[in-house]
Image (spheres, rainbow, N blue to C red):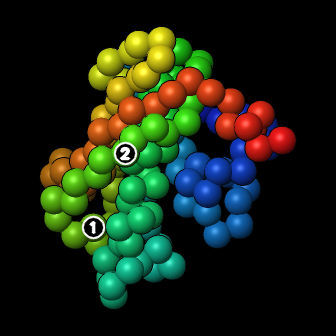
């Protein structure tokens, strides 16, 4: 699997040098991307349970990485739907997966999940638009 990263990555989810960030490392293969991580106590909402916004950020990033791995295309999120099936415990090993489900020139659809011991805890779908987010903020 190919590790996905780039110079000056300032992403809160996957930036390797972002202070306090999740530092998720996504690796790409033929079926999409995968990251293994353990969420520390800092990312909890209720005691011992991961914050839903953090989990939404993880699946959003997994889908972005899946698209980038599939076509080397930078995108921005157009729509994100997240379903929380079970609480996600802090301090437990998690597997985050993302894959492209449909590729069109204007809109790319992707899916992602967060699992513990093969049990899906969070699932998501998203639609992404091709675009350079850096250019839009200058």
**For the point 39% across and 41% down, which residue is it?**
79
Query: Residue 48 placed where, x, y %?
Result: 32, 82
Task: Out of 90 and 102, give the one closest to the viewer.
Answer: 102
Is 98 located above or below residue 95 in the figure?
Answer: above
**For the point 41% across and 23% down, which residue is it?**
108
Residue indicated by mark 2 = 80
Where disc 1 sits, the SS reads loop
Q: Which mark is residue 55?
A: none
Query: Residue 125 placed where, x, y %?
Result: 30, 39
Is 61 located above or below residue 55 in the figure?
Answer: above
Query: Residue 6 placed where, x, y %?
Result: 72, 34
State how far apart marks 2 and 1 are (Cα): 19 Å
Task: Out of 54 and 1, give the one closest to the viewer.
Answer: 54
* Residue lying at the far bottom of the rendered structure: 47
Select label 2 or label 1 by which is in front.
Answer: 2
Task: Out of 25 and 50, give the one closest to the viewer.
Answer: 50
Q: Which mark is residue 88?
A: 1
Upstream in sequence: badge 2 or badge 1: 2
The C terminus, quarter of image: top right
Count of labels shown? 2
Task: Out of 121 and 111, give the one closest to the viewer.
Answer: 111
């Amino acid at each position: 699997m190919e590790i996905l990263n780039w110079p000056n990555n300032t992403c809160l989810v996957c930036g390797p040098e972002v202070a306090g960030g999740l530092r998720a490392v996504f690796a790409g293969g033929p079926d999409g991307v995968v990251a293994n991580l353990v969420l520390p106590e800092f990312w909890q909402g209720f005691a011992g349970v991961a914050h839903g916004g953090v989990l939404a950020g993880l699946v959003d990033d997994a889908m972005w990485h899946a698209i980038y791995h599939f076509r080397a295309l930078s995108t921005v999120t157009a729509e994100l739907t997240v379903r929380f099936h079970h609480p996600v415990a802090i301090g437990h090993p998690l597997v985050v997966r993302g894959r492209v489900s449909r590729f069109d020139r204007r809109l790319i659809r992707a899916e992602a999940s967060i699992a513990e011991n093969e049990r899906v805890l969070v699932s998501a779908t998203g639609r992404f638009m091709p675009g350079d987010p850096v250019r839009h903020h200058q």
